[in-house]
Amino acid sequence: MNPPILSGILVALIWGIQPVISRYGFQQGLTPYDATLVRYLTSGLLILPYACKRGLADACGVGWPRGLVLFLLSGPLFSLVLVGGVNYAPASHGALIHPALTPLFGMAISRFVFGQRERFSLWGVLLLLAGLVLVGSNAILASGGLAPAGAWRGDLLFVLSAFMWAWYLVLNRSWKIAPLDAVALTQVLSLGAMLLALPWLGGQTFAKPLPALLLQSAYHGLLVSIVSVALFNWVVARLGVRALMLNALSPLFGVIASAWVLQEPLSVSMVVGALAIVGGLAVGLRGSGASPRGGT
């Protein structure tokens, strides 16, 4: 297997188990505020030299009005929504709902807001919707203890996170912004916001278990925010749109990790829903005309 494909699989793994890491932090006593604080303190400090090189005065070439919009869509608010979802719902739900809905929302936004016709297989859409119905029914019914009561609240937060991320991706493409520039600006602005919040949140956050904080910092602040984005851009440069096909592995990795690491029980509807979502992403992305952009 060649290096670009292996790298693409690694990116899918990083993105796929992101909800699992967040859920583990919640089980260790971390709040969404704690996870968000350590994530952006880490990523912001790490990418600050690159952002300064690109020029902070000009918002890394993005422009301040557009940069602020992207910051609102993909910065601390996005993190609070996404991480907040695992406070209510199993990590497996987040691993399925967010990646499944993002391309659907992106397709709708591109078509109905920007008048662009995205090529997306009808069969892919139907499989995605069928999988989401199965996952959603599992959350609402919460029968047999397979999902916690109120899991639907977490699922709604995952839906909102997918909607925000879809807008971020579509605007990046429409504005023709280099992905690393957008990421650098977002992380640095997020760092500024976290430094402002530090006097209020720092005391409670850094009183939490250090291993749990270090895991969130390394995983979200380094792997998700920086390494996976840079690696995905490298993969796209070599595989083109085919790189999107590898994203279909993310939900599968997430469901497997949630069952293995967190010991979350999986109902038949969840397993069938996961297979439908993975199949829908694979079929849909094969015919997608969308320009690939970086991860979450």
Image: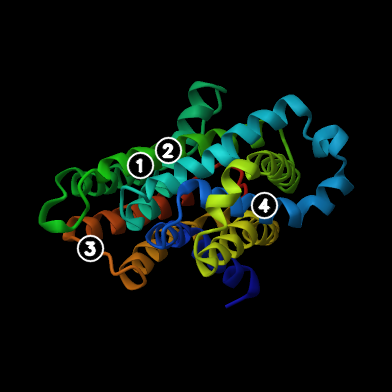
Question: Please, what secondary structure does the residue beneath circle 2 have?
Answer: helix
Vertical relation: 290 (above or below) 273 = above
Say how the picture is coloured.
Answer: rainbow
Q: CA distance from mark 2 to mark 1?
A: 7 Å
Q: Which mark is residue 115?
A: none
Question: Please, what secondary structure does the residue beneath circle 1 have?
Answer: helix
Q: Which residue is mark 3?
A: 266
Choose top left, top right, bottom left or bottom right for residue 263. bottom left
Of tags 2 and 1, which is closer to the observer? 2
Q: Which residue is mark 2?
A: 104
* Labels 4 and 1 touching (C-beta < 8 A): no
* Labels 2 and 1 touching (C-beta < 8 A): yes
Q: CA distance from mark 3 to mark 4?
A: 35 Å
Of tags 3 and 2, which is closer to the observer? 3
Question: Please, what secondary structure does the residue beneath circle 3 have?
Answer: loop
The amino acid marked with disc number 1 is: Val
* Labels 1 and 3 touching (C-beta < 8 A): no
**Residue 280: x and y, percent?**
36, 50
**Residue 286: x and y, percent?**
47, 52
Q: Going 54% across and 61% down the picture, which residue do you hit?
A: 216
138 sits left or right of 156 in the view: left
The amino acid marked with disc number 4 is: Leu
